[in-house]
Amino acid sequence: MAWYDRHARDLPWRVLPAARAEGVRTDPYRVWLSEVMLQQTTVAAVDRYFRRFTTLWPRVEDLAAEEDARVMAEWAGLGYYARARNLLACARVVTRDHGGRFPDGREALLALPGIGPYTAAAIAAIAFDRPETVVDGNVERVMARRFAVEEPLPGAKKLLTEHAARLTPDQRPGDYAQAVMDLGATICTPRNPACGICPWSDDCAARAKGIATELPRKMAKKPKPVRLGTAYVGRTPEGAWLLEDRPARGLLGGMLGWPGGEWLEVGPEAEGDTGDDGCPAPGTAWQQVGEVRHTFTHFHLRLVVRAARLPAGFNPPRGRLVPAAEFDPAALPTLFRKVHAASRDAWTD
DNA sequence: CACGCGTGGGA
DNA sequence: TTCCCAAGCGT
C-alpha cells in the first residue's frame, strides 16, 4: 500500500489517497463508467471517451435520459458495442429502480446489465471500499507469477482467484485492488516485467525460478480466417449519404454503417471479386474506389469499397438517407470510418 | 463452457 | 507485416 501511495497513476476517474484524505469523495457513477469502458480496453483509449462522456452526462440520470443513437455515436470507435447498449440499460435501471444510486454490494451490482464478476467486485471495492477481490487480466498475471502457477489459462482462473482472495486486505481494499492492477499494468507487464523495481520481487516464485516472462501460460489461439465483402457508399445529388442502421445484436450491433452484402469466408485460393451482393441500388453505376482491411476479434476482413451518385429523388429500398449536414463520420465504428475515407476521392466534383 | 464480440498500440 | 494483447460480459 505504501507503494500505491507513492506510485498510483493519476487517472481521470480515480481519487488518489491524498485527495481522499482532504475529503474528495469517490463517485460510483464515474467508477462504473470507467470500469465498463476499461473492459478489454487500454487506459490510453478510454481516457478521451471518459472525459467526453462525463462532460456530456455528469450524472447517471443524464445518461439515462439520453437517446440511444446519441450514446452509440459517442461510443463509436471504442469497440465492443454491446457495452454501450448495456451501459444505457444499466443507467436506466439505476435511475428508475434505485433512485439514481448505484447499489453498494457485489451481488446487487452483478444483477445489473453489463456488470459481471470483475466489474461488480471493482465497483464494490473502489467506490464503496468493500473487501471484494478484483480479478482481471492484470491480477491473473501477477498471481500466476507470484505463486508460479504453470497451469494455462483459462483453466487456472479458479486457482488464481483463490490466491488473489487470500491476499485481499481488510484495510483499504479499494486502493489495494487498484494497486495490484497498476502493478500489472506498469511493472508486472506481459512481455518484459520490471522485476528490479517490483515491490513484490522478494515474494515472487516465478522470479525465483526464472520463469516470470513465461507466465501466465495460455491455451493456443485459433488462427483468424479471412472474410470478403463489399461496402456501398452512395450519395444523392444534394449530398445526402445512404446509410443503414445495423440490427441491435451481433457484430457492430446498434451502430450506423454502409449497406453491403454478407461477409463470407473464402478458401486460401479463390479471392476473386464479390459480385454485387447486397447492392442497395442495382440500377446505379457503381465504381470501385478502394479496398479496406480491418481485423476483428475473430476474423480478418477485406472490403471492396464501391461509390456512386444516386439518382435524383432516390428512394432507398433499404437503409436511409442522412443529409450532409447531419452526417458525422466520427459517429461510425472504425471499420466504416475507413470505408468513408476510402470513398473520399469519389466526391471531388 | 466455448465462443462472439473492436480497436489501437507495441514488439 | 504480423502478431499479441487490454481493467470482460452475455449467451
Image (cartoon, coloured by chain):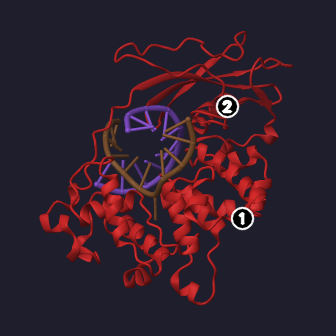
Chain colours: A red, B purple, C brown
Q: Residue furthest left?
A: A209
Which of the pair A146/A16 is nearer the observer? A146
- Image quadrant assignment for residue A336: top right
At a point 55% along the width and 11% down the height, the residue shown is A275
Q: Secondary structure at mark 2?
A: loop
- Image quadrant assignment for residue B11: bottom left
From the viewer's perspective, tell me whether residue A101 is left or right of residue A269. right
Q: Amino acid at mark 1?
A: Thr
At a point 78% along the width and 52% down the height, the residue shown is A66
Residue A253 drawn above or below residue A199: above
At a point 68% along the width and 45% down the height, the residue shown is A72
- Work out whether mark 1 precedes mark 2 in sequence or the reverse, and give the earlier one: 1
- Spot occupied by residue A217 in the image (x, y as percentages of width and height): 25, 50
- Which corner quadrant holds the N terminus of chain A? bottom left
For residue A312, which numbered disc appears in the image?
none
- Spot occupied by residue A287 in the image (x, y as percentages of width and height): 62, 18
From the viewer's perspective, tell me whether residue A176 is left or right of residue A21. left
Subunit that carries the residue with mark 1 = A
Return the residue at label 1: A55
Q: Secondary structure at mark 1?
A: helix
Return the residue at label 2: A246
Subunit that carries the residue with mark 2 = A
- Spot occupied by residue A115 in the image (x, y as percentages of width and height): 57, 54
- Which corner quadrant holds the C terminus of chain A? top right
Crowding around mark 1 (Cα neighbors within 10 Å: few <14, some 14 to 19, many 20+) is few
From the viewer's perspective, tell me whether residue A10 is left or right of residue A75. left
Q: Is residue A9 visible?
A: no
